[in-house]
Amino acid sequence: MRLLLCLTLLLGGIAPALADVQEVRVWQSPDKTRLVFDLSAPSEHKIFTLNNPDRVVIDLDNARLNADLGGLDTRSTSIRKLRSGTRNQKDLRIVIDVAEPVNASSFPLAPNDVYPNYRLVVDLEQSNKARAVVPVKKADDGYDDNKRDIIIAIDAGHGGEDPGAIGYGRTKEKNVVLAVAKELERLLKAERGFAPFMVRTGDYYIGLRERTNRARKANADFFVSIHADAFKYASARGSSVYMLSERGATSEAARWLADKENESDLVGGVSLEDKEDHLAMTLLDLSMTHKRNASVQLGNSILGQMGQISTLHKKQVEEAAFVVLKAPDIPALLVETGFISNPQEARKLADKSYQQKLARAIFTGVTGYFRTHPPRGTLLAAERETAPVFSTYVIRSGDTLSEIAVRNGIAVNDLRRLNDLKNDQLRIGQRIKIPNT
């Protein structure tokens, strides 16, 4: 279609529009450097690599440079220098001098709500650098090889080209959620029996499906995606927890948020030219139903903690078709820490101490669930198997048998029968057995 359009323009004597390169941005991730060129009009381009010395060449048809290449901060990247020149009196050539051999790829992006210009995305991937995926405990940590950690994949939403929602005071969602994710990582690192895996560690974008792919490669037991989104009404407020929907969204807000989140690949920069295999996706969707119960229980555990520090938008786990939650073999949830479009919540979300409280709430909810439901082969599962069946409780002033039963989630009759009690009378200092659930 693009070739046909070019031929039509040429045959009709109409020259294609001149494309100005108006701005250039650079993003560095652990495995690649990304350059994004803002263009005033679409431009056909070619990209290739040369060596001795190593460099990447980009040729843009009927284009000119109106951006400052020398002003780019490339200190933490593989880029040594960017140069430009004119070819054939109308085309633009950009040369990227790199410090090491790279695999170069590129794709165009059309304008959208966030970026009104056309964009050309260029990825420079280190060809000799392998990314370590699975978190590993040191040998001197005292763990048995057969008693592994429970791996929690932490996904900070958005990043890089995709700022996410922008709230009061120009607070960017991508920065808020990365701060919460890093605090959650710190808490899990310090917790015996758990190991965090950070899907995104800095300010760069990762495609929605790639996020869950990385979690699966890390053998994660649970995937949690952290967000602080916006809604079309500034009055919307409160924390929420979402799981993947099989049928549709459970509310208007859930549907609206899912639609906005699923557009992230268009904003953040992911080539959508390769279509998915529909049969494979159908099989994937069917296999995900096996993890729904665990997702619901995990979500309720997190909601119970979030409700102690913030207003809840909904008191139950909601459902919507979030692409990032399509992890076929692990429980997956999306946590909306609050609405950054609400001025009061935006101020709280930008506060470091509140970010720490949010991370602590997610941490307590996740670890609380897995202490009760530890995966087979983990350290917590081994400790649970060797733990005593009963614990002992010493009666204090004001205790009643019914209150103790409610607190521990057991029936009064079962508690009475277990302790051989003829009635509900208790005395201070009396010891009774409580079953470990």
Image (spheres, helix red, strand yellow):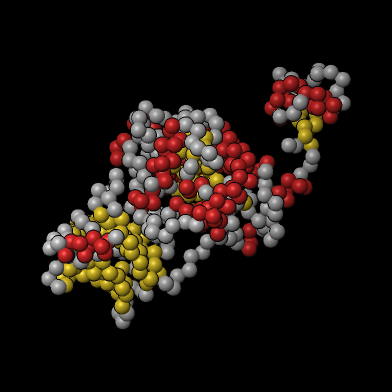
Q: Residue at x 41, y 36 (%)?
A: 256
Tell me, yes or no, if residue 186 can be seen here.
Answer: no
At x 58%, y 52%, the residue is 283
- Indicate whether 99 appears above or below 11: below
Q: How many marks?
A: 0
Residue 41, visible in the rendered structure: yes
In the image, 306 versus 275, the foreground residue is 275
Is 34 drawn above or below residue 324 in the view shown? below
Q: Is residue 396 above or below residue 197?
A: above
Residue 111 on image: x %, y %? 27, 50
**Quarter of the N terminus within the rendering:** bottom left
Residue 263, image x, y percentages: 38, 46
**Quarter occupied by residue 373:** top right
Residue at x 29% of width, y 47% of height: 112
Q: Position of residue 392 (x, y in %)?
A: 78, 33
Relative side of 30 to 171, left or right: right
x%, y% of residue 377? 70, 54
Say which residue appears at 34% left-offset and 30% top-offset.
234
Foreground pick, 116 / 371: 116
Q: Is residue 76 left or right of residue 152?
A: left
Q: Is residue 98 above or below residue 186?
A: below
Q: Quadrant of the C terminus?
A: top right
